[in-house]
Image (cartoon, grey):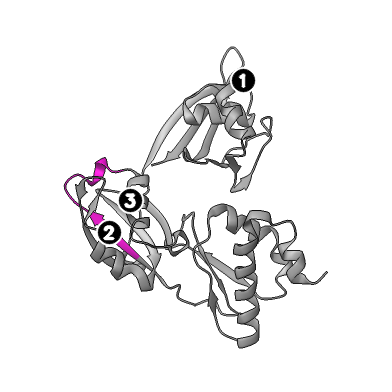
Amino acid sequence: MNNREKFLANALEDRDVLAKVFDKAQAAEKKGIAMFTSFLSEREAAIVEERRKHIDSIPYKAFGGYDEAGRVMLCFSEYEDEIFPIKAIRVTGKDVDTLKHPDLLGSIMSLGLERSCVGDIVKSEGEWIIFCEEDIASYIAESLKEVGGVYVNCTECEVSELKVNLQFETITGTVSSLRADSVVAVMLKTSRSKAQEYIEAQRFFLNQLLCTKCDKEIREGDILTVRHHGKARLSEISGKSKKGRIFITIKKYM
């Protein structure tokens, strides 16, 4: 079995994405030039990282436009100073604070674009920021006039000009143990049985990798993602109550 076959082994639904990643790596090696992927989801990027030993000797780095980006491009290159072809679009307007992530994503997808062309869509102070491939930035900025019934103004900018201040919802609670189902229940403000349903339905990702074990131990700093219900970080484990329950603080991305 060659490296390509090893890299793609048991990839299932991710096979097409991984094949494109591998081909970019091979092209970078053969041509001696930097090759960039489209945006990968956190899960896809984590799978590539797991299998990177099969991508011969070509190094790569990941970047999504800002330091804590979830969706990232990969750059295969021998050099460290490659500039990623990413631009940002600042979305402002009178009522942009009322918008939600699905509103922005839905409006962008309605423009006929592939999801892999668009990176993170994040809420910052008084605005939303869309990260995308540089060659479609002008098209999005010129086409996006209304989102979820709200009129918006879009301005292109270089990612180097941005300072992204992510917005979080702070959630506190107590759990009897640090099992995945218990922590997810606090994160989603739901019952433990409902959290178990999400996990068993393969909708829960721990540090970007699928997790189907309800009793998986969650550690401080772990990233929790429930598909269609958001992403959060277990930011603090702060001791126990008199009844032995564990105090936790979760920072949920807005």
Q: Residue furthest top?
A: 243
Q: Is residue 110 left or right of residue 58?
A: left
Point out the frontmost of discs 2 and 1. Answer: 2
Q: CA distance from mark 2 to mark 3?
A: 12 Å
Q: Earlier in the sequence, mark 2 or mark 3?
A: 2
The percent position of residue 178, horizontal first and vertical second, equals 63, 29
Q: Residue furthest left?
A: 94
Q: Which residue is mark 2?
A: 90
Amino acid bearing label 3: Leu
Q: Is residue 210 left or right of residue 10?
A: left
Q: Which residue does the image show at 44% across and 64% down from the upper left?
A: 117
Point out the frontmost of discs 1 and 3. Answer: 3
- Report the number of numbered marks: 3
**Circle 3: is it few (<14), some (14-19), or many (20+) Cα within 10 Å?**
many
Report helix, strand or loop for mark 1. loop
Report helix, strand or loop for mark 2. strand
Q: Is residue 158 magenta?
A: no
Instruction: Check residue 104 in the rendering and tell me which mark sits there, or answer none.
Output: 3
From what the image shows, is residue 177 above or below residue 74? above
Q: Which residue is mark 1?
A: 176
Report helix, strand or loop for mark 3. helix
Q: Is residue 146 left or right of residue 20?
A: left
Magenta region: 88-99
**Circle 2: is it few (<14), some (14-19), or many (20+) Cα within 10 Å?**
many
